[in-house]
Image (tube, rainbow, N blue to C red):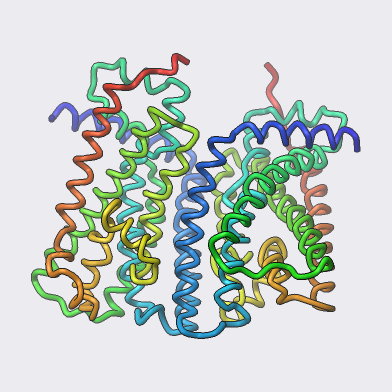
Amino acid sequence: MWHTLTLYRRLMSVQMRSQMQYRTAFVLETLSTAVIVAVEFGSVALVLNRFGGIQGWTLAEVAFLYGMSETAFGFMDMIFAGFDPPVFGQHVRRGTFDQLLLRPINITTQVMGSEFTLRRLGKIALGLAIFAFAVQANQIIWTPLKLAYLPVVMFSLFLFFGGLFIIGATITFWTVDSIEVMNILTYGSSFTIDCPMTIYPDWIRRFFTFVVPVIFLSYYPSLYFLDRPELAEAPSFAPFLSPVVGVGLLLLALRFWHFGIRRYQSTGT
Amino acid sequence: MRLFWEFTVRSFQRHLTYRAAAVAGLVTNFFFGILRVSVLLAILGEQESIEGYGRAELFTYMALTQAIITYLSLFGWYDLMNAVHSGEIATDLLKPMGFVSFWLARDVGRAAVALLLRGVVIMALYSLFFDMVHPTSVAQVTAVAVSLILALLISFGFRFLLNLSAFWSPNARGIGRFGFTISWFFSGFLMPLAFFPAWVQQIAHLTPFPYALNVIVEIYTGQLTGPALWQTLCIQLLWVLLLFTLAHVTLRTAVKRLVILGG
């Protein structure tokens, strides 16, 4: 375990140093990840501000959902970047994944350490700024339980997204061409939870409740933090399932990953 | 001209080969379209329409913008940039054809596949499931077609210029991402421009971006007619001329800076 951690730290520091080599390029790329969030949230904010919210949710309340999702996804996208399905798929296609398999070191650690996209700090910073605005603008009634639970929800959401990336990466063992469909799970969940779940058609809400249960990591906990009236209709345990669902999905993803590796046959290139 | 046609056809065939990816792309496209339109419908709420957009217009907006993503390479296009960085550009410059026309030919081939394989299919698919607004006269269909072609040329001009930054920076990806992101906002891809406050709309119309996307929706849904339609098509044409002139001028300066290592 100790050995694995040291190794991961090494791999990470190599990644960071190489990305910092071209200072201007690095700054620009970091800025560009921030600009994407700024522009996307900006367009939602401008419109919601003009029309006074969306289905009874104020801009500040939507910002709470938005900031949470962007921050957690940003951290995940930085740390789990090695599993990013299109990137990892290229390693499988080119055969560079086989090189990793040949080394007598834990394969998961190697893939984790193969990519660490520092430029996502831009996205993370913007996500945190939106979240800070939301916390301040919503005048949340803080209780000790809420204060303790908030980081748990954030971390669970982070693990959940990480699990989705690992599942996507594993699927590339079988198909690389159709990997775009994975975007429905990863970017789709992140996009969906930016807004209150009540705006979507029933089948989409069911999909994100029973198939990809991201609803338990953002929408339900947010009802609890913001004391929204919808909370009364939801099952009383729904806001508190975050850690179970987050950790559960990651563990499931890891099992699938190991299953995939055992079945993996190289392309031979 | 014959050469232009040959390059277009080759590029068309090359892009036609990835069929499994095309199906995957369709499914994804459809799903994201529904997510995006849900947000717009929720904003509309109980109202009949906002700024000329009722339910049918919103579905049409969503379908058109989703159908056009690959046609205009909205999510990014870095081919020219990569050619500069890899040095491939040296052989491209030697080809017995104008450099801009060479890349335009390839892009037209790519765009034609995108329009047929994705654009038309996506529009047909969405029309099956949702009540949409379609052009009602031959004149309107023609206007949409002309506007689509001009939009591709505007988009190409912008992408070409953005890619030329590779001549100045060894890692121009950041600049590229930056540019594409700005274009989503001002083109009306993230939200119909009419939904933004007036001052944002005014700023947007000083840029070429609305003329590559938002106007297509407005022509298709019949919001732009008569003199306003003619005026829009003229502005589109002006932007094409301006961007292509800029592309030629910038290219000349860029090539002077270029040093390729042999080997």
For this view, does A165 lie left or right of residue A87? Answer: left
Q: Is residue B227 above or below residue B130?
A: below
Q: Nearer the viewer, residue B173 or B114?
A: B114
Which residue lies most toward the left here?
Answer: A144
* Residue found at x 63% / y 61%: B64
Which residue lies most toward the front here?
Answer: B128
Q: Is residue A250 above or below residue B242?
A: above
Residue A78, picture quadrant: top left
Q: Nearer the viewer, residue B262 or B68?
A: B68
Q: Position of residue B16 (x, y in %)?
A: 66, 35
Instruction: Kindly tell me whether residue B134 is visible in this rendering.
Output: yes
Q: Is residue A95 above or below residue B69?
A: above
Residue B61, picture quadrant: bottom right
Quarter in which the C terminus of chain B is drawn? top right
For this view, does B23 lie left or right of residue B158? Answer: left
Residue B93, picture quadrant: top right
Q: Position of residue A158 (x, y in %)?
A: 26, 51
Instruction: Kindly tell me whether residue B179 is visible in this rendering.
Output: no
Q: How many marks?
A: 0
For this view, does A10 lie left or right of residue B3? Answer: left
* Residue found at x 13% / y 30%: A2
Q: Position of residue A264 (x, y in %)?
A: 33, 22
Quarter in which the N terminus of chain B is drawn? top right
Q: Nearer the viewer, residue A106 or A92?
A: A92
Q: Nearer the viewer, residue B260 or A231?
A: A231
Q: Position of residue B92 (x, y in %)?
A: 77, 30
* Residue found at x 22% / y 46%: A249
